[in-house]
Amino acid sequence: MPPPGVCLNIIKDRNQERGMGTVTDPLKFRGQDFYWLRDQFLKNRQRFIDSTFPPDSRIIGPKLLSSKMMAKVEWKRPHKMVASPCLFVDGVSRFDIAQGCLGDCWFLASVGALTCQPQMLQQVVPNDQGFQRDYAGIFHFRFWRFGAWVDVVIDDKLPTIDGNLIFVHPTTKNEFWAALLEKAYAKVCGSYSDLKAGNVSEAMMDFTGGIHVMYNLKEAPPNLWDLMNRAVKFKSLMGCGTAQGATPENVELPNGIVQGHAYAITGVVKVMSHGRPVNLVRIWNPWGRGEWNGDWSDESSSWNTVTVENKMSCLQICKDGEFWMSMKDFTMNFEEVDICCRTPEFLDDSPSQWGSSCHSGKWVAGMTAGGCIKFRETFWMNPQYQVRVTSGTKGSDHPGSTNMVVSLLQKPDNGSRSLSPNHYIGFTLFAVPPELRDAKGKFSASFFNSSSPISVTKPFMNVRETTQVFYLPPGEYVIVPSTYNPEETASFLLMIFSKMQTSVGDSSAENNMTINKKIYSSYAPTEHESVFAQYSDKLKEVDAEQLQKLLNENVVTDMSSGGFGLEMCRSIVAMMDLSVTGTLKNAEFSRLWKRVQAYRDVFIRKDVSRTGKLSLQELRSAIQAAGVTVSDDLLNLVALRHGSSSREITMESFIFLMLRLDSLNKIFKNLSDGKGMYLKEKEWLYLNIYS
C-alpha cells in the first residue's frame, strides 16, 4: 500500500527541490525504475509485463472498439509479428507512421512535428533501448506532465487484430518506435481511449515542457508568418487544425483538406514567384495520405514560377500526406495555429533571455474556488500570485514589445484524461497601487471591488491550458487564476515567463501557518474547578470517556451532529497530557478549558448564519479571528479533512481543529531548528501514535 497522498506530495516537492523532474533526471512514473526493472528481467531471462498497465481490454478503454473487434484483439510483442523488429529503421521521420483506427490525430500530428526536431525527439524517445542488445520486453519514454518530466515504463505487448497493429502503424513493417510511444502516452493519459480527440497543443507541451501560444486564424496578427518563421529557427513544434464540419466525421473536402482534423506544420519558406515574394507553409497529414490540391500543391503549376533551386529544395511529388500551400490559402482553410517552444523567444525579434517560474495550486469549493471576477463576493478567495517587475533587458521595456507570457493549466485529479472534466478556466491581471505594494498576504474583496483589471482571459474555455501574452511596465501586479464559476474543485499549474527581472510569490503561502496571537491567553477558565470536580475520578483526573461526557454536556449546544466523538477526545487528551498518563490532571484540564472557551466564543461570533455550523467561507474568518493565519494550501487540506460532505464545520470540529493547529505549531517549534525537523523512527512513531 502506498503512503498517504499528502506524504506523496511532500516527496514530490522535495524531489523537485533537489532537481528531480528535469528532462535529465525525470521522476519515475508510478514508481517504476526502467533500468532496475530491465536488469532484473535480463538477469532472470524473462520478458517484462507491466502490471500497472496490463495488456488487456482495460487499457484499451471503453467505447473505442466494438465488442466484436475487442474479442479479436491479441496482444503481441513485435518479434511475434515480424522476424527482425527494430525501434528505428534508417533514422526517424514523420513518414514512418500512419494513423490507425484510434482518433488521435492531435497526438500523431504532434509526433510528426517532433520528428522534425531530433534533439527533442531523443529526450522523449531515449536511444538507450531496442530489440537487439539488452532486450527484455521493456521500453521507456519521457513526457513533461504538469511541471515535471516523468519517465514512463511500458512492456512491448501491442494490440493487434489478425496480426496487424490496430492503432498507429509503421509504414516500414518492422519499425516500432511510434507504436510504443503511443502506448506510453496512453499510459500517462489513462488508456488508449483517453487519446481519442484532443488538442495538438497538449502533446506538444508534453514533448517540450515549454510555452504554448495559439493563434486564431480569423484574428491572426499580420506578422503571423514571421512568427512562424522565427518559431522554426527556435526549434519549436507547430501544429494546426481545421474547423469541424456539419457532422463529427472527418470529411475530406474537394480541395483535399479534412474537416475537424489536426495537422503538423513541418516547415515555412519564402519564394519569389513572378517577381513577388510568396510565404509558404508546409503541412503534414498524420493519416499519411490526403493532400491539398490547390495552388502550391504537389501537382500545381505554381512551382513552375520559382527558381530551380527553390523547386528542388521544396517540392517532393509523393502521396505521403505532406503538402505546401500559400499563407493566404492556409489562413482561409485552417482554423488555428499552435506553436510550442521551450521559451517564448520566437515572439519578437529582439534577442533576450527569458526567465520562468512554475506554481502549483488548487481550487477547493468553498475555500479557494471563488469563480471569475463576475462573482465579486467570492472572487478574492481564489489563489493570488503577486508579480514584481523591477527592470527589463534592452529591447524589452517599450510598449510595442512582449515581455511576459502567462499560461494556466488545469490538472486531472484522477489520472484519466477523458474522465477528468475540464472546467472553464482563465486568469485576471491587476496592477497593485504604490500604497499597497508592501502588503502581505491576500488582497481582500474590497481591493478587487475597487480595482479594474488590466486583462481578463476572454473567453474562459473548457480546455487544458490557456495562455496570454503581455507587455508589462515595471511595477507590481497580482494574477488571479480561477474557474469561471465558483465552487469548482480542480488542481492547476500557473507558469509565468518573463524577460524582465521578475519575482513571483503566492500571496498566501509565504508562511504556511502563523500564530499571530494566542487569544486564549487572556481567558480565565471560568467554572473550570466545579466542572472538573463533577466529572473527574477519585484520583482527580479525567480520561477520554469522561472528557467526552464533560464536553458534550457543557460545551456543545446542539447534539444533532453527534458532538465530540470518543476518538476526538482521545486525541485531545493526548495533546494536553504532559505526563503521558492517558488522563488530564487539574492543571492540564485548566489549560484545555480556557482554549475550549476561547475557540467556542470565536465559533459563535463567526457563525453569522446561526446554523450551528460554519460554512467554509466562515471557517477562514474564524481561523483568522482565533489568531491564526494559514496558507491557501493548508486551508484546502483543513476543508478536506475537517469539513463535512455538506462542506460545513461543526463547533466540536472547529475546536478540535484549533487545538490541533496549536499543538502542531508547538511540536515543530520545540523539535525543529526553525527550518526543518529530524526525527528518529522511534520518535516519529511515538509522536504520531500518541497524538
Image (cartoon, rainbow, N blue to C red):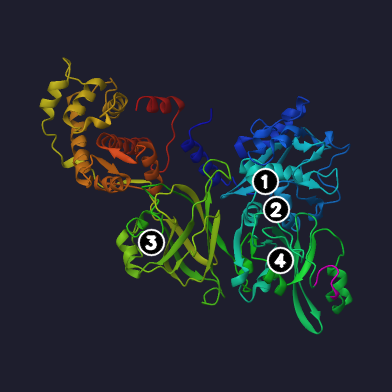
Quadrant location of residue 597?
top left
Could you tell me if the residues under marks 2 and 4 are in contact, i.e. CB atoms within 8 Å? no
For disc 2, the marked residue is 105
Outermost residue toward the bottom?
275
Amino acid type at mark 4: Val
Q: Is residue 571 above or below residue 498?
A: above
Q: Please say whether residue 519 is visible from this viewpoint.
A: no
Which type of secondary structure does the marked residue at label 1 adopt? Answer: strand
Q: Is residue 608 above or below residue 683?
A: below
Could you tell me if the residues under marks 3 and 1 are in contact, i.e. CB atoms within 8 Å? no
Give the main secondary structure, helix, strand or loop, of the magenta stretch.
Answer: loop
Q: Nearer the viewer, residue 162 or 190?
A: 162
C-alpha span from label 1 to label 4: 23 Å
Sequence-wise, the earlier of marks 1 and 4 is: 1
C-alpha span from label 1 to label 2: 20 Å
Q: Is residue 613 above or below residue 313?
A: above
Q: Which residues are magenta?
A: 296-301
From the image, state whether disc 4 or disc 3 is nearer to you.
Answer: 3
Outermost residue toward the front?
246
Q: Is residue 187 left or right of residue 660?
A: right
Which type of secondary structure does the marked residue at label 2 adopt? Answer: helix
Where residue 567 sits: x, y (%)?
Answer: 32, 25
Could you tell me if the residues under marks 1 and 2 are in contact, i.e. CB atoms within 8 Å? no
For disc 4, the marked residue is 232
Q: How would you rate the neighbour count of disc 4 (Cα within 10 Å): few for under 14, some for 14-19, many for 20 or more?
A: many
Amino acid type at mark 3: Lys
C-alpha span from label 2 to label 3: 37 Å
Q: Quadrant of the C terminus?
A: top left
C-alpha span from label 2 to label 4: 22 Å
For disc 1, the marked residue is 142
For disc 3, the marked residue is 374
Sequence-wise, the earlier of marks 2 and 3 is: 2
